[in-house]
Image: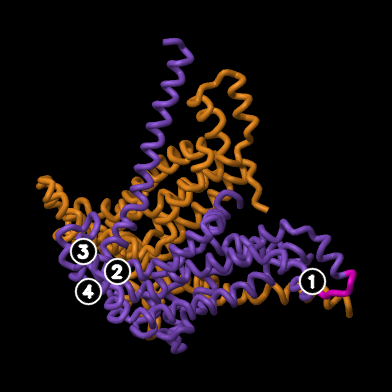
Chain colours: A orange, B purple
Amino acid sequence: MKIKKQNIIPYLFILPAFVIHACIVTVPAFSTLIMSLFDWNGMGNAKFIGMDNFKEIFRDPLVKLSVIHNIEWLLVFITIPLILGFVVAILVSRLRRSQMFFRTVYFIPYVISAAVAGRIWMAYMNPYYGVNQVFGQMGWEKLAKTLWLGNPKIALFAVAFVDNWHWWGFIMVLFLGALQQVDSTLYEAARVDGANRFQELLHVSIPGIRQTIAFVLIMTIMWSFLTFDYVYIMTNGGPANATEIMATYIYKNAFVKYRAGYANALCVIQSGICIILYFLQKYISKKGGMEDE
Amino acid sequence: MSNGVRNKTKYRISSVVTMVFLILMVLFAAVPLLQVLLNSFKTDRECKTSPLGLPTEWAFNNYGETWQIGGYATAYFNSLLTAFVVIAVVLVVVGLGAYALTKLQFKLRGFFTAYFFVAISLPSFLYIVPDYFVMNKLGLVDTRWSLMIVYTAIQIPFNMLLLRTFLAGIPRELEEAAKIDGCNELNSLLRITLPIAKPMFLTVAILVFVNVWNEFLWSNTFITREELKLVATRYVRFTGEYGMNMARIYTASVITIAPVVILYLFFSRRFIEGMTSGSVKG
């Protein structure tokens, strides 16, 4: 009797969390997979149509456009915030007393709601009442007339700029944390060997944080295909689909056009890309000797 | 100039350049937010004609008006209520779960650990559509329950693994000793582990609070009734309605982010450690 009781207790402890999560996340996630094969408006009867949703996806010009925007987004995010975060992390890691101050300030934009950050920058980018007003007063006519969010050529990058403002500090803190865990005797050894700052960086710092670099790279690729908040809040895919990305297009299909089946098929593709990348990241970091358990 | 002096000057110049650069980045991060705070004390006219810089005359009426018109009392209440329910449930189920994963031996331990690792990676868009339509059928859309349930579920995997890392650092001997003294598992969790792990539970609570406060996608989808909206969605609606009144937009922004920013300034280390954990290790 006693042994039996012992066996049951761990399950009683773990099951509440597991059941809640499985009901809201895992089971619906599987149903998304299945419903992607149906023509369904969310309410009425679903009609099985096999792979038709997926065939439509490959013909849909807006899907193509969205994916291109996601890739453009990725190109921005895999360069600017990573380089900026890395450089700043290196510089901050050399400081002593002021390190905490810089870390705390750089991280602030990351803790703020995307909804608010997006709207604040929309106010600044307002063509009449925002920074353009200031540019005009300075006599910079060309800048003053720029429609940051209204010009299809630059809208996506204007939104990406704002997301970067919120994002780079997080990357910087990740790199800084990793740099602090690099064995300090390695630096001493490098110095004894007569290495300069740059050689130190190349041969000690970068190899020392390569797992974090790999993590950040792969996560950036994943997040670039999932990104939603900033684009939805600032432009909602406009003007003229110039900022349409996969997530906003899925959202419109599911909750505006009520094409739930089609949206599910898009979700499957989007999540497929991300889950593959997630496991790739796990695999690479395991290969690099990083402890998971 | 001798070599040593030249090196010293070179070093000085590079450290001055570094400092200037780092301070410019501080301005880049902080000025847009400080300007929002300053603009919330300007008149609407001044916000429009000079959106940058100090107010020429300080207007203090924005806050009262925005709070009233924006229905922020209700929105704050909704967000706080939702956050507290979610925090309470998450702490209980994640506390129990993480205790089992770190301190107890059972057959499926590996399976459950792996489950939560995979669960972290599932993107919201993979389950938001079925969740919405199922909850719609059950009549839960446009009720507080929908968000409480969804947020609890979403918060579980990350916080489970976070707490698991924390609890793994507490020596098992302490709980063993308690059990020899006749405590059962629940008692040893409550009497031994919990008091030691209190700061860790606080970190989890803070992270859950911030996530609930900031969340937009789900609350925008599940709640359409104004009186049930949480702060972030209420804010987006309000700034859409009063899009032409810049002073109100800036003021509403301050009202919306103030609790999180204040919390952050008090607990910045917990924020940073909690939000970046799981990315450096595991």
Q: Give the residue number, with chain letter if any, for mark 4.
A: B242
**Amino acid type of the residue tagged 1 in the rendering:** Ser
CB within 8 Å, label 4 to label 2 = no
**Amino acid type of the residue tagged 3 in the rendering:** Glu
Q: Give the residue number, with chain letter if any, for mark 3.
A: B57
Residue A275 location, x and y as percent? 50, 57
User: Badge 2, how many Cα within 10 Å: few under 14, some, many 20+?
Assistant: many
The boundaries of the magenta stretch are B180-184
Question: What residue is drawn where x is 58% and y is 41%?
Answer: A180
Residue A135 location, x and y as percent? 15, 49
In front: label 3 or label 1: 3
Q: Give the residue number, with chain letter if any, for mark 2.
A: B251
Q: CA distance from mark 2 to mark 1?
A: 49 Å
Q: Is residue B7 left or right of residue B237?
A: right
N-term-proximal mark, 4 vs 1: 1
Q: Which chain's residue wears label 3?
A: B
SS of the residue at dot 1?
A: helix
Q: Is residue A244 left or right of residue A48?
A: left
**Amino acid type of the residue tagged 2 in the rendering:** Thr
Q: Give the residue number, with chain letter if any, for mark 1.
A: B188
Q: Which chain's residue wears label 2?
A: B
